[in-house]
Image: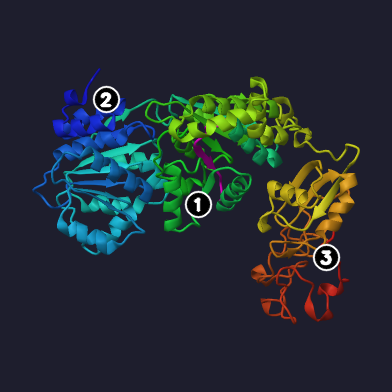
Amino acid sequence: MTTFNELGIRQDIVRALTELGFESPMPVQEKVIPLLLGTKTDIVALAQTGTGKTAAYGLPLIQQADTNIANPQALILCPTRELCVQITGDLNDFAKYTDDIKVLPVYGGSSMDIQIKALRRGVQIVVATPGRLIDLIGRKAVKLSQVKSIVLDEADEMLNMGFLDSINEILAEVPKDRNTLLFSATMPSEVAVIARNYMHNPAEITIGSKNAGAENIKHLYFTVHAKDKYIALKRIVDYYPSIYGIVFCRTRMDTQEIADKLIHDGYNAESLHGDLSQGQRDLVMQKFRIRHVKLLVATDVAARGIDVDDLTHIINYNLPDDIQAYTHRSGRTGRAGKAGTSIAIINTKEKHLIKQIEKKINKQFIPSKVPGGREICEKQLFNMINKMENVEIEHAEIDPFLPTIYRKLEWLEKEDIIKRFVALEFNRFLEYYRNAKDINVSEEKGRDKTGADRASRRDEPGFVPLFINVGKVDGLYPATLIELINANTHGKRVRIGNIELSKKSAIFEIEAEAAAGLIAELKDLDFRDIPLVVDYAKENSSAERSSERDFGGGKKFKSGKPFKGGGDFKGGKDFKGGKEFPGGSKYKGKKDFSGGKDFAGGKDFGKSKKKKTRKP
C-alpha cells in the first residue's frame, strides 16, 4: 500500500493528514501528486466528486508555497461560494502544521473590503469564484503576476453556469508559463476547448471512465403516474429510515412546494433554490451539514458546489433537462469509496430518458417497485428496534425511577410490554399505510400506445370528470390539487382518478358520490387569490380548456395561437382577414383586453354575443 510519505509529501502535512484520518492516498491522489511535485506538467484530471480531488492538487500547492512571498502563487477557481468555502477549509486543515501559509477564499456575497484587506496583508493561495475575482482584478486589488499554478476545479460546472468569458479573462491575467490543472467530472466539448487553448501537452488522468458515474453508486428507477410522484417520494423516504440525501427538482417552484409538503408531513426537510438570500442558504446548509435536516430539496443550480460527505441517497424527483447533469447529481453520494444510491422517480413518458442516461454513464438502472405499506412498516419497525438495542443508557439518571416503573408494569407479561411499546411508537405508520394502494406502473402498461398508461378511470362506473379554473401558472399541480380535494371532503377518503393539467385549468376524475359535495365546498373558496370555479366537465373537455382568462369557450384564434394577456397585436393584424386594426395598436375601447375579460363599454368584438366565462 502506497503512503503519502512515498508520494513525496512533507512530514508536517502528513501529520495533519493522519489526524484527519487519511491513511493512504486515493487513486486520483496517487496519480496527480507525483506529477505536481515532479516536473512542471499541465494536467487534465477526470474524476467524480468525492474521489479526493482537493487533496490531489491541494497537498502539492501547500508544499510548494513560499511563505516569504506575500502575493498569490496558486489560484484555484471553482463555481460556487459553497465549494469555495469548502476547499479553503480543507486546505487549512491540510496546512495545520505548516507555518505562516495563508489561504484566502474570495467569493460574492461577502464583504469585498475585507477580502481586499486580507490580500494586502499577504496570501499564498487564493480560492475564488470567477465573478468576484474579475471584480478584484478590475479594482487592481489582486496581483496575479506571481501565480505559478492555476486550478480549474469542477470546470464543467463553471462552464454550465456561464463563466467561460470570465475564465478566459482570468487566464489572460496570469503568467503564460504557469502550471494549469483542470479537474472535471465530465469532459464536454467546452472543457476540451479550454484544455486545447490554454494547456501545453497536458497529461490526462481518468479515474473510471470518461463521463461515467462512480462505480460504487447503485442506480434505481421507479415508474409511477405523474400524479403519484409525491406519494412515491414519501414511500421511498419511509422505506429508508436512515436516509440522508438530496431531492432534486427541476424548478424553484417545484423545489419549494415539495419541501413545504415534506415539512408539513413531518419530515426533516428544507429547500435550497435561487430565491433564497445568501443568509438563508447558509443557514439551510449549516443545518444540513450537522444533520438537523435529513432531506435537502434543491435545484441543480442551487446545489452546485455542495460538498457534504456520507450522503446515502440522491433522489431525482424530476430528471434534469441536461442529461449530463445527472452525473453531477448522482456523484454527490457514494463518495470516498462509500456506497451510495441514486434514485429516479419517473412517469411512463420519461422511460427514454433513463436509456439516454444509461448510455451516458455506462451503467444500467435497476427497475424497482415503490414499496407497499407492509414493506415500509417492517423496515420502520426493525429500525426502531435496532435503535432501542443500541441506545446508550444513562444509568445514574434513570435508575432512581426504575422501582416505581417496575411496580407500575408488574401486572404485564414481557410479551405484553413489548407489544405495547411497539404500538405506542408505531401506530402512526400502521394507520397511515393500512390501506395503501399499489402505485407502481408496470413496464407493459408503460408501453401501451392506446393511452391505458394514463390510469384513467373515466370509463369505470362511479367516476366523473370535473373542471377547475386554475392550472400550472397558478401553482396547481397534482399534489396541490389532491391536497385541496382532501381538505374539503370533511376527512372522508375520496378516490381520485386521472388528472389533466394545462396552464390555466385542469380536469380531474373523482368518485361520483363525492362530486356534488366537493363542488359546493369549493365554490366560495379562493386558490392563491383566484376565485374557484368547479363544475362537471363536458364529455369533450380536456386540460387545454381555458378559464375566463382566455375568451370564454377557450377557442384559439385563426392563426392557431391563443390571445395571450391582452398585449399589442403582433404586427397590428386583425384576427380574421389579416386586416390592420385602426392604428395598429392596442384595442382602444374603454379597457384593454387585460387578462381576457369581456370588452368594456358594452360592445363585443365583431358584434358577437357576449359569452359566459369560467365555465366548462
Q: Is residue 245 magenta?
A: yes
Its colouring scheme is rainbow
Q: Main secondary structure of the magenta part?
A: loop
Magenta-highlighted residues = 240-251
* Circle 2 residues within 10 Å: few <14, some 14–19, many ≥20: some
Q: Secondary structure at mark 1?
A: loop
Chain-order first, disc 1 or disc 3 = 1
- Between tags 3 and 2, which lies in front? 2
Looking at the rendered structure, the kind of residue marked 2 is Glu
Query: Relative to residue 6, is residue 287 depicted above or below?
Result: below
Marking on residue 23:
2
Q: CA distance from mark 1 to mark 2?
A: 37 Å
Give the labeled residue for mark 1. Answer: 273
* Circle 3 residues within 10 Å: few <14, some 14–19, many ≥20: some
- Between tags 1 and 3, which lies in front? 1
Q: Are marks 1 and 2 in contact (CB under 8 Å)?
A: no
Q: Residue at x 63, y 38 (%)?
A: 234
